[in-house]
């Protein structure tokens, strides 16, 4: 009999779905209208869960799965998983570490370029027929140079390092903050986030949100200043979103490029009208290549755990 797996989010790579279906009986919870009833009916048979980084899984759902042996996160963020409870049950919680690094770093740089150079607002200007209507060059304000910007990176893990490598090639001096300075990183460590913001033209968030909720607040944004840009490809909850909206409204910061939000898919509507803000719908890892690599790691983690081995990418066991 094939092991039963509970899938909380869709996977968009057909080859991965085919492999899952060959190996497992897959229960697609995201397709069920009455999820509680579905869990009551099938919960006892479930040996593995696949969830997304943003969705995670909380204790109350894990409690409905008494035979659970593994939670495979199709992502790197585990802030939405009750890790403590998973540890108490000796459940491996795995991530797709390394698979999405390059794409997430690419989008961070893309958001910085798009925001500072007005790429999306320029695109909207043309599509709205405004170039013909207002052909004078002054119709579009001058942009902000990215090359050479002083960049501050919050979180010098895999993604932070990949962003630093890219922006170093743009001639950007790189500083960073993290829980501690790192010996194997050639960039300048700044222990305090307000200080980092003060000395940066662009602050890029690449930190895990497990213990860093709301670290970017009004004080940090004020330190970043009216010529400073905030880029977030990590988690919305790293930022006090009300403080960010207030700073953008007041011009306390220069602009923002945001892939993640506190209450996705709800984005503060006041941002929709701001040309100095670039918005993405949590897309940093959403390429064919990365999602396929992530899917393969999810498959490997399930296979290892259900064979009674410690999964290579387990965070909890
Ligand atoms: C995931 C993410 O790709 O890795 C993460 O933590 O937030 C995302 O980029 C997403 O959860 C898809 O499963």
Image: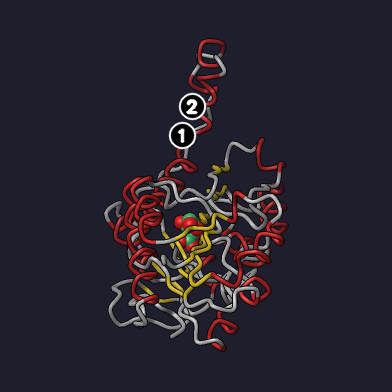
The residue at the far front in this view is: 1
Q: Residue at x 34, y 55 (%)?
A: 19
Q: Which residue is mark 2?
A: 123
Crowding at dot 1, Cα within 10 Å, few <14 / some 14-19 / many 20+, comes out as: some
Q: Is residue 29 depicted above or below 69 in this figure? A: above
Residue at 33% x, 65% y is 98
Q: Are marks 2 and 1 in contact (CB under 8 Å)?
A: yes
Residue 56 in the image: state x and y as whole percent.
56, 66
14 displayed left or right of 209 = left
Viewer can see residue 234: no
The one nearer the camera, 54 or 105, is 54
Estimate the spatial distance between the alpha carbons at disc 2 and disc 1, rounded to whole Å. 6 Å
Q: Which mark is residue 11?
A: none
Whether residue 142 can be seen here: yes
Image quarter for residue 36?
A: bottom right
Task: Provide the residue designation for mark 1.
Answer: 119
């Amino acid at each position: 009999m094939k092991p039963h797996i509970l899938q909380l989010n869709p996977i968009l790579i057909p080859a991965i779905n085919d492999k899952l279906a060959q190996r497992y009986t897959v229960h697609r919870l995201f397709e069920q209208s009455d999820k509680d009833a579905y869990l009551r009916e099938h919960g006892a048979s479930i040996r593995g869960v696949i969830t997304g980084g943003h969705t995670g899984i909380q204790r109350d759902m894990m409690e409905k799965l008494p035979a659970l042996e593994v939670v495979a996160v199709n992502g790197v963020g585990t802030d939405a998983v009750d890790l403590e409870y998973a540890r108490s049950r000796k459940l491996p919680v795995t991530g797709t570490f390394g698979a999405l690094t390059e794409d997430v770093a690419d989008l961070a740089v893309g958001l910085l370029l798009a925001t500072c150079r007005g790429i999306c607002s320029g695109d909207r200007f043309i599509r709205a027929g405004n170039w013909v209507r207002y052909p004078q060059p002054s119709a579009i304000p001058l942009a902000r140079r990215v090359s050479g910007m002083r960049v501050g990176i919050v979180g010098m893990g895999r993604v932070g390092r990949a962003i630093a490598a890219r922006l170093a090639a743009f001639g950007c001096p790189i500083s960073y903050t993290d829980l501690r300075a790192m010996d194997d990183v050639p960039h300048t460590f700044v222990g305090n986030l307000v200080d980092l913001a003060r000395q940066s033209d662009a602050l890029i968030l690449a930190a895990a949100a497990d213990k860093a909720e709301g670290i970017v607040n009004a004080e940090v944004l004020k330190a970043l200043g009216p010529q400073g840009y905030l880029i977030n490809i990590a988690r919305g909850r790293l930022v006090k979103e009300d403080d960010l909206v207030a700073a953008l409204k007041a011009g306390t910061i220069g602009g923002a490029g945001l892939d993640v939000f506190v209450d996705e898919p709800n984005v503060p509507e006041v941002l929709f009208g701001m040309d100095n803000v670039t918005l993405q719908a949590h897309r940093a890892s959403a390429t064919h290549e990365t999602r396929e690599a992530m899917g393969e790691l999810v498959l490997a983690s399930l296979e290892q755990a259900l064979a009674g081995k410690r999964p290579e990418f387990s965070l909890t066991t």
